[in-house]
């Protein structure tokens, strides 16, 4: 286990600058399926929350409600004190405040890497082209793919594409970054290069919600682990506490399966 200080307890590590994302009593159904059940979750500015749980427990749906790719049936979600807008320009701005990185990279295939990272800045943030390109190049350097700027996504490895997707999300200046299994579509040798970029982001103080099966990342980068099952948050704790002393049978069962693989 690394001695990174953020693992030493969520309260010490999170700067006391307030709550950034607040879900209060959120419920959502897909037809008869109650996919999110009474979800209360508060994420502080600068906090890194790893969400784990069995397949179908609602992790992706939870992420998608936070940037309103999915609507909710009841309850409330606020980002930086503001409720999620229903639609229109306000919603586009909110989406820009909430960066999202998925399992599949979703880059525009017919645009270069550089264009992928400038497009949102120009369209949504109204940044001029020169400034957008300068920022894009700096971000591509930061995630280690600066030399790939003029290529097309298909000319890059999966790990490189995912790092471009991270740069693209960061280019919008998001307040919070959501990652939904960002490494699970990657070949094993490319997983670490993406996790390292995420580790660095966490160290730089980005507020992050990360759905992942990478327990090493959870242990070293998370302030808090949230364990979901059947649409509910079953327990949450610091990584040390959660991995060494899971309280619920569901969590014990889940950990015994993933840790013995
Ligand atoms: N658009 C949809 N319409 C109907 N049911 C859906 C929809 N999206 C998800 N579901 C169902 O909701 C439940 C939760 O799905 P979700 O994708 O949030 O789970 P998950 O925890 O992310 O799972 P995994 O680990 O497999 O990614 C599942 O039973 C899924 O089949
Ligand atoms: Mg999922």
Image (cartoon, helix red, strand yellow):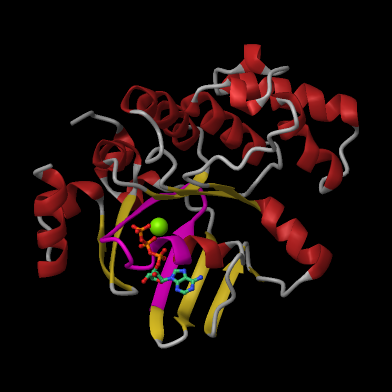
Query: Which residue: 54% across, 85% down?
Result: 73
Confirm whether residue 249 shows in the render: yes
Quadrant in the rendering for residue 236: bottom left
Location of residue 149 in the rendering, given as x and y in whole percent from the top left corner? 69, 18
Quadrant assignment for the N terminus: top left
Q: Which residues make up the magenta segment?
A: 36-61
The mark tally for this picture is 0
- Which of these two is toward me, 155 or 231? 155
Location of residue 89 in the rendering, given as x and y in whole percent from the top left corner? 83, 63
**Quarter of image, ligand 1:** bottom left
Location of residue 114 in the rendering, given as x and y in whole percent from the top left corner? 73, 25
- Which of these two is toward me, 199 or 13? 199
Quadrant assignment for the C terminus: top left
Quadrant in the rendering for residue 13: top left
Above or below for 253 versus 40: above
Above or below for 214 versus 37: above
Would residue 255 appear left or right of 66 to someone viewing this image?
left
Confirm whether residue 248 shows in the render: no
Query: Which residue: 18% across, 54% down?
Result: 242
Quadrant in the rendering for residue 53: bottom left
Location of residue 64 in the rendering, given as x and y in whole percent from the top left corner? 53, 63
Query: Which residue: 73% across, 17% down?
Result: 150
Verify whether residue 27 appears in magenta: no
Would residue 218 appear left or right of 102 to someone viewing this image?
left
């Amino acid at each position: 286990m690394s001695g990174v200080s953020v693992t030493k307890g969520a309260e010490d590590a999170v700067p006391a600058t307030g709550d950034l994302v607040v879900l209060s009593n959120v419920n959502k159904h897909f037809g008869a399926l109650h996919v999110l059940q009474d979800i209360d979750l508060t994420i502080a500015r600068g906090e890194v929350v790893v969400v784990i749980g069995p397949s179908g427990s609602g992790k992706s749906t939870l992420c998608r409600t936070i940037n309103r790719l999915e609507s909710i049936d009841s309850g409330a979600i606020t980002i930086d004190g503001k409720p999620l807008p229903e639609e229109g320009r306000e919603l586009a701005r909110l989406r820009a405040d909430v960066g999202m990185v998925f399992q599949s990279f979703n880059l525009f295939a017919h645009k270069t890497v550089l264009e992928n990272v400038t497009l949102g800045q120009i369209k949504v943030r109204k940044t001029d082209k020169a400034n957008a390109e300068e920022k894009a190049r700096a971000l591509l350097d930061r995630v280690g793919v600066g030399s790939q700027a003029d290529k097309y996504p298909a000319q890059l490895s999966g790990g490189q594409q995912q790092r471009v997707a991270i740069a693209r999300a960061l280019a919008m200046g998001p307040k919070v970054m959501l990652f939904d299994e960002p490494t699970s579509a990657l070949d094993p040798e490319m997983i670490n290069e993406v996790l390292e970029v995420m580790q660095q982001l966490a160290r730089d103080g980005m507020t992050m919600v990360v759905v992942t099966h990478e327990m090493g990342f959870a242990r070293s980068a998370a302030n808090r682990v949230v364990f979901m099952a059947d649409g509910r948050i079953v327990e949450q704790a610091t990584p040390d506490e959660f991995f060494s002393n899971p309280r619920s049978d569901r969590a014990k069962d889940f950990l015994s399966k993933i840790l013995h693989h």
